[in-house]
Amino acid sequence: MLQNSDHVVIVGAGFGGWRLVEALRREGFDGEVTLLGEETYAPYDRPPLSKQVLAGKWDAERATLATPERIAETKVNLRLGVRAMSLDVESNTVELEDGSRVEGTHVVIATGARARRLPFSADDQILTLRNRDDELRMRLELDGLKAGSVIVVIGGGFIGAEVATQLKSRGFVPIVLEALQRPLIGVLGPDVSSWLERLAADADVELRSDQHIRDVEHGTEGFVVRFEVGEPLHADAVIVGAGALANFEWLEGSGLTLDNGVVVDENLLARESIAAIGDVARFSWPNVMGEELVRIEHWEVANLHANELAHFWVTGEGTRALMVPYFWSDQYGKKIQMLGHARPDDDVVRVSGSPEEGKWLALYSRGGVVTGIVTLSQPRGLMLSKHLLESPSTLDLALDDAPWAD
């Protein structure tokens, strides 16, 4: 258990790192807390970047979580613009890029993930959207383009679709290029992805699936996207939304177990005094199907991790309650929401609505047990059905109960 003489060093000043600062104080820890951030900005919320900020409805500052008042209230030692280079797990010491070292009694790894880049010739000129520097660069680029400019979005997943939606609202002509048969087929499965396929067309956004790009080049007249087969595509700007990579390379050689993230136990510990939370953590997840080692890049998971770790370190009390992951995506004028962490090859049945109505609710199941709930523009039905994932529920009983219909 933490004592007030302890010093907690949190590496990563994103959403999860900041929520942990707040949770530690809320749990009653009054010792020293140092929050290290590679970016120069105070901790902020990332989801608005591809939604309200890109749409021009919010200034980026509005997404800030750690206001000067909250920083003072939490008594956190905030060090920004410092990149962590290594971790000595024996002394709980973080070495920074400037050569300085920060030693604590406890260390939390909350370094999140970064945008995945693709090996194109024009990589330096291609835009991504993961952090505030990305948003600033994208805003400056877009401000220099005329309405009607063609902008290619590579990747039709959640971020790609959200970006294309905002580009359309600003008067640009987005063309979304998806490598797979349909966007999100590798995440939501063939049935659900087919129900969502019409959203882009309904929003008058051009979506091209099964696109295999050989290279993207940049010249005096803009960008040229070259395909393995077919005619090249000319564009005024190119944005890549091809997923993310966990930031854990700086821990290589530390002695921690690294496998698609930092492997932690049921209490989020990599060692007794070292933990990992959020996007970078590969954690033991109790769910309706048993227990599974997963890494989940969801806003809500980072929030839950921060609260659970703070509670465990302050009180010594762990939790084995079934965590129900949640995420949402606003795209093409609709809201996709999902509870659980279903596999794309799980069975799926639509129990309410239809693609033609533009709203529906579906259940995923595996071996007859409900593993996930996904909805299009049916938020109330989703929340009414959440209990189906808080303890094991058979698909037959769920269909008989039909909580989404209340």
Image (cartoon, rainbow, N blue to C red):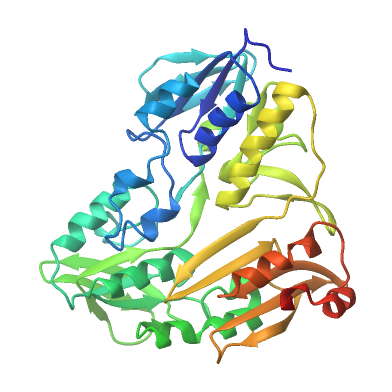
Image position of 7 with respect to 373: above or below: above
Image location of residue 152, percent across then percent down: 30, 73
Residue farthest top in this picture: 5
Vertical arrangement, residue 277 with respect to residue 167, above or below: above
State the quadrant of the C terminus.
bottom right
Residue positioned 79% across, 61% down in the render: 387
Q: Is residue 145 above or below residue 230?
A: above
Snapshot quadrant of residue 357: bottom right
- What residue is shown at x 59% (from left), y 44% (from top)? 302
- Give percent across and percent down for residue 288: 83, 58
> Would you say residue 346 is visible in this rendering?
no
Rendered image quadrant of residue 269: top right
From where the camera sits, is residue 24 visible?
Answer: yes
The single residue placed furthest to the bottom in the displayed view is 356
The quadrant of the rendering that contains the N terminus is top right
Q: Residue at 49% x, 41% y: name it.
A: 15
Q: Position of residue 382 (x, y in %)?
A: 67, 68
Q: Nearer the viewer, residue 375 or 176?
A: 375
Would residue 307 appear left or right of 218 to someone viewing this image?
right
In front of the other: 404 or 7: 404
